[in-house]
Image: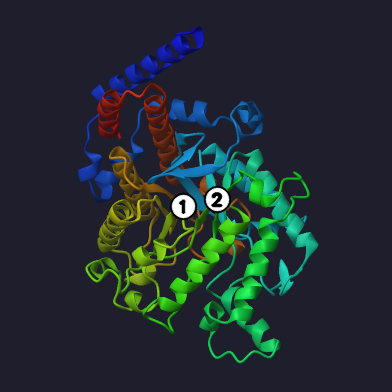
Amino acid sequence: MDTQMRNFGLKVFSLVTIFMLLIQNSSSTVADSSGDELLETMVEEDENELAYSSRTHGRADELGAMEDDPWLMVQKNGNQFVVNDQPFYVNGFNTYWLMVFAADQSTRGKVSDLFKQASLVGLTVCRTWAFNDGQWRALQKSPSVYDEEVFEALDFVVSEAKKYKIRLILTLTNNWDAYGGKPQYVKWGKAAGLNLTSDDDFFSDPTLRGYYKAHVKTVLNRVNTLTSITYKDDPTIFAWELMNEPRCTSDPSGNKLQEWIGEMAVYVKSIDPKHLVEIGLEGFYGPSTPNRVQFNPNTYAQQVGTDFVRNHQVLGVDFASVHIYADSWMSQTITDAHLQFTKSWMEAHIEDAEKYLGMPVVFAEFGVSTKDPGYNVSFRNTLLSTVYQTILNSTKNGGSGGGSLLWQLFPEGTDYMDDGYAIVLSKYPSTSKIISLQSVRLSKFNSLCSWKCRWGCKKKHALETSLYHDDL
């Protein structure tokens, strides 16, 4: 064994020793906790945890020191994400409007502020829009006609994300009319003389499919004007998302949407086989799994033309996506039932991703609105803790829980964009602490898994991982 390997062995031994000391001073009560007990367990950490967080995430203006780590593509190995063959768990956020803010010099600095603040609490993935169809500050002004200034703004978002070691999930269009999306494509089609009767014609009309494919091709082949890296070759991009929350209510059978997903996933892969692809679904169960519809938040969810298991069995789709909005899907008034639903919703999808899909699942949107009756910060913190602990419970067993992305993170001075779900870290230190501690936990777990991968000590790894998770 050479000197480098001996040094590595000593570091691993020290790490495990520290974990064991931490374990002896803690108890494994989180999995069985609820409400305030769960929040207390998640938040009350000793000073060693906070010191670890500071050392791990450091100052955002010193990130140049991290350049020694190779910036490689995120890939999938079975039901887990990996980078350079090492485990990668997602602790991230949504901020959909970054491109539009970057297009205006007066607001561009907010993009940098956001990435800096996110990096300081250890967030590693951001989901944002790579589209704005026919609207104010449109990226795509009409089919295949682009505003170069806005495209350069997207270049800036990608470039700036890399600077702060944050990867991006780029969404290629919207089911809803915000930022154009599916309805705008139909408007373009009608203007071209097509006989279209529903926004859902987006999924079936050959011309509209062609419009969408042309946009996909343009974005994936874009050469970043700041980095000179083609998007399809840039490891900063975590994954491509076909559409935000696709639904096809005109066809509850799900066949129309299924065909569209199959065609578009393969098309994306034909241009860019390197990056991961996901659909952007909310996660509703459909006709293919009648025994699972009990987990849906309401009966209407079964009628929107989506089908979680069937949709994700399509060739070209690498991981599953699920959203969590108990306050929108069940009742707006805050109750403990929202927390119970969140936990069972997540566990059902993690189980299905393991049993039937063999892929990771990312809970790509979750949150609670400050406009909900009965809302308070304590409830939001408990919701975050519930989501985070469910992810950790999955990682303990080598499960398919790949991570989560809160909706949504804002920098200071952007309150006018708030839809009720915005989290400004500086305003909510208790929430910021919960987010940071999740980053620490996932980082520690990645270290243990890396040890397993390098040394092949499967039994040792299983023992220490189990003990470590008891500490969580």
**Residue at 66% of width from left, 39% of height from top?**
163
**Which numbered disc covers residue 405?**
1
**Residue at 60% of width from left, 36% of height from top?**
71
Left or right of 254: which side holds 167? right
* C-alpha distance separating marks 2 and 1: 7 Å
Q: Position of residue 251 (x, y in %)?
A: 41, 82
Quadrant of image for the N terminus = top left
Q: Amino acid at mark 2?
A: Cys
SS for callout 2 = strand
Quadrant of image for the C terminus = top left
Marks 2 and 1 in Cβ contact (< 8 Å): yes
Circle nearer the N terminus (2, 1): 2
Query: Which residue is labeled 2 in the image?
Result: 126
Q: Amino acid at mark 1?
A: Leu
In this rendered view, identify the residue nearer to me: 270 or 61: 270
Q: How is the image coloured?
A: rainbow
In this rendered view, identify the residue nearer to me: 231 or 439: 231
Q: In the image, is residue 404 above or below residue 29?
A: below
In this rendered view, identify the residue nearer to me: 239 or 387: 239
Residue 128 appears in which quarter of the rendering?
bottom right
Q: Position of residue 357 (x, y in %)?
A: 35, 55
**Which numbered disc covers residue 351?**
none
**Residue at 67% of width from left, 51% of height from top?**
231
Q: Position of residue 83 (x, y in %)?
A: 51, 37
Residue 134 appears in which quarter of the rendering?
bottom right
Mark yes or no: residue 299 visible.
yes
Left or right of 143: which side holds 445? left
Q: Position of residue 98 (x, y in %)?
A: 64, 56
**Residue at 38% of width from left, 33% of height from top?**
445
Q: In the image, is residue 446 above or below residue 284?
A: above
In this rendered view, identify the residue nearer to me: 222 or 29: 222
